Amino acid sequence: MARTAGSHSDITGPRIRAAALRLFAREGYAAVSMRQIASEVGLQVGALYNYTPDKQSLLFTLMDEHMTALLAAWQEEPKGAVPEERLEAFTRFHIRFNLERADAVFISYMELRNLSPENFLAVEAQRRAYETALEQILSDGVAQGVFAMADPKVASLALIAMLTGVNTWYRAGGRLSLSQVQGIYWDMVRQMVQAR
């Protein structure tokens, strides 16, 4: 099947993914058809299949791209040397990175159930790698006596859930700046892990 006249894969592919991201976040994966995605981009539905084999592949691509970007950005983030500095870096990074990608974050949590088993395992492995990075910070802090908690794994999951929750209420231009929100959350995180 030929591409639509004037379409370019380096332009149309990202437009398709952006449209799918918006629609999946707004209406839910199950409720969105390939026809809706094509209409959003201004393509015939058959033309979508030049860019993605099916809707499942599109969902997986969106989640995989998000998690790959998250892991790569965290890898590059300056972290400091001691557990408290690393925990503060994680707190501020998680809020900043995810606020800029609210739809991708929403889909990554709400649409996991719609992934095929093999795609679920791939995304779950990426999520586990990110969660383990925080768990290691907490475990190091406990080992050094600067943090106190019963279970670093449970604590890491609880902290990620709390930090991700900023996406549900924060709006740029509101009462608090991003920097202020990061500071408030860092104070709460520090108190939760009982950093001395």
Image: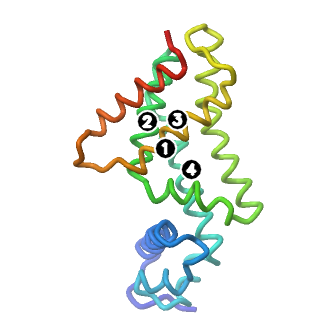
Q: CA distance from mark 2 to mark 3?
A: 11 Å
Q: Amino acid at mark 1?
A: Thr
Q: Nearer the viewer, mark 1 or mark 4?
A: 1
Is residue 13 in view from this perspective?
A: no
Q: Which residue is mark 1?
A: 164
Q: CA distance from mark 1 to mark 4?
A: 14 Å
Rendered view: 117 above or below 27: above
Sequence-first disc among 3 and 1: 3
Q: Which residue is mark 3?
A: 75
Helix, strand or loop at disc 4?
A: helix
Task: Confirm or deny contact between disc 3 and disc 1 (CB under 8 A).
Answer: no
Crowding at label 3, few (<14), some or many (≥20) Cα neighbours within 10 Å? few
Sequence-first disc among 2 and 1: 2
Crowding at label 4, few (<14), some or many (≥20) Cα neighbours within 10 Å? many
Residue 188 position, x and y percent, is 44, 26
Q: Nearer the viewer, mark 3 or mark 4?
A: 4
> For the point 38% across and 86% down, which residue is it?
6
Crowding at label 1, few (<14), some or many (≥20) Cα neighbours within 10 Å? some
Q: Which residue is mark 2?
A: 93
Q: Which residue is mark 4?
A: 67
Q: CA distance from mark 3 to mark 4?
A: 12 Å
Task: Confirm or deny contact between disc 1 and disc 4 (CB under 8 A).
Answer: no
Q: Nearer the viewer, residue 87 or 26?
A: 26
Helix, strand or loop at disc 1?
A: helix
Residue 69 position, x and y percent, is 51, 49
Sequence-first disc among 4 and 2: 4
Rendered view: 52 above or below 97: below
